[in-house]
Amino acid sequence: MGVQENTISIIRELEKNALQIDNAQAQELIAQIRNAQRIFLQGAGRSGIAIRAFANRLLHLGFSVSVVGEISSPHSRPGDLLIIGSGSGETSSLKSLAQKAVESGVDVALITLKKESTIGKLAKSVLVLPGTVKTENNHNQGQFSQPMGSAFEQLCFITYDAIVLELMAQLGETSENMFTRHADFE
């Protein structure tokens, strides 16, 4: 297969997975976002890259947002929300972060493949995105499947944008309005 065929296969895989997203779970996450005093976000690896893009759009919507680990990230307090993106829900640094958040009275939301993961059990809401957990032994088994956690990471990115669109509708936000919050020092 060539690049064009691979691209079409990826889009079909993502569409198949997107059809399985539970809208009630997504709405629960959206309610948490809307009710949070401040929002902290974190993920590891490629999931971390996707969640940073989500943080950026939440900032453009006017939310108080910080990526965990950034030097300008403030102290957390009850009423805040920690959103974690983790396919497995078992990444050790993210498990520790979720545990600390719960102990500090901060609500946790998880975007994952595994609702019953360690972080999932700590989270107040879990949005499950269908896909395959990355392992050393992922094989095609006769059907198209992307390597490792690629499909999850891509679906995260698209789902985060879909959540932003829903928040825009609920909050009466427009792209023009959001652009006024876009960085001007670049």
Image: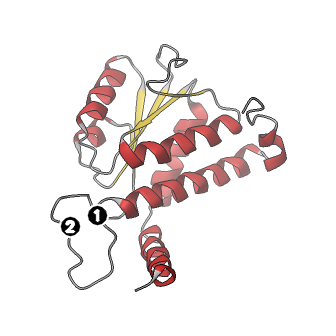
Q: Where does label 2 land, which residue?
A: 138
Give the distance between the C-alpha atoms of the residues marked 1 and 2, in whole angstroms: 8 Å
Q: Quadrant of residue 62?
A: top right
What quarter of the picture does the C terminus occupy?
A: top right
**Circle 1 sits in a helix, a strand or a loop, which is it?**
loop
Q: Is residue 123 above or below residue 117?
A: above
- The residue at the point 42 percent across, 68 percent down is 20
Q: Where does label 1 land, which residue?
A: 132
109 sits left or right of 158 in the view: left
Q: Is residue 48 above or below residue 155?
A: above
- x, y (%) of residue 154? 46, 60
- The residue at the point 47 percent across, 44 percent down is 49
What quarter of the picture does the N terminus occupy?
A: bottom left
**Circle 2 sits in a helix, a strand or a loop, which is it?**
loop
118 sits left or right of 76 in the view: left
**Is residue 126 among what the camera can see?**
no
Of badges 1 and 2, nearer the viewer stands: 2
Q: How many marks?
A: 2
- x, y (%) of residue 171? 73, 43
Spot the residue most to the front: 2
- The residue at the point 46 percent across, 55 percent down is 156
- Asked whether the beta carbons under mark 1 and mark 2 sit within 8 Å of each other, the answer is yes
- x, y (%) of residue 32? 52, 37
- The residue at the point 17 percent across, 59 percent down is 136
**Is residue 147 among what the camera can see?**
yes
At label 2, the amino acid type is Asn
- x, y (%) of residue 175? 79, 49
Mark nearer the N terminus (1 vs 2): 1
At label 1, the amino acid type is Thr
Mark 1 burial class by Cα count in 10 Å: few <14, some 14-19, many 20+:
some
Residue 155: assigned label? none
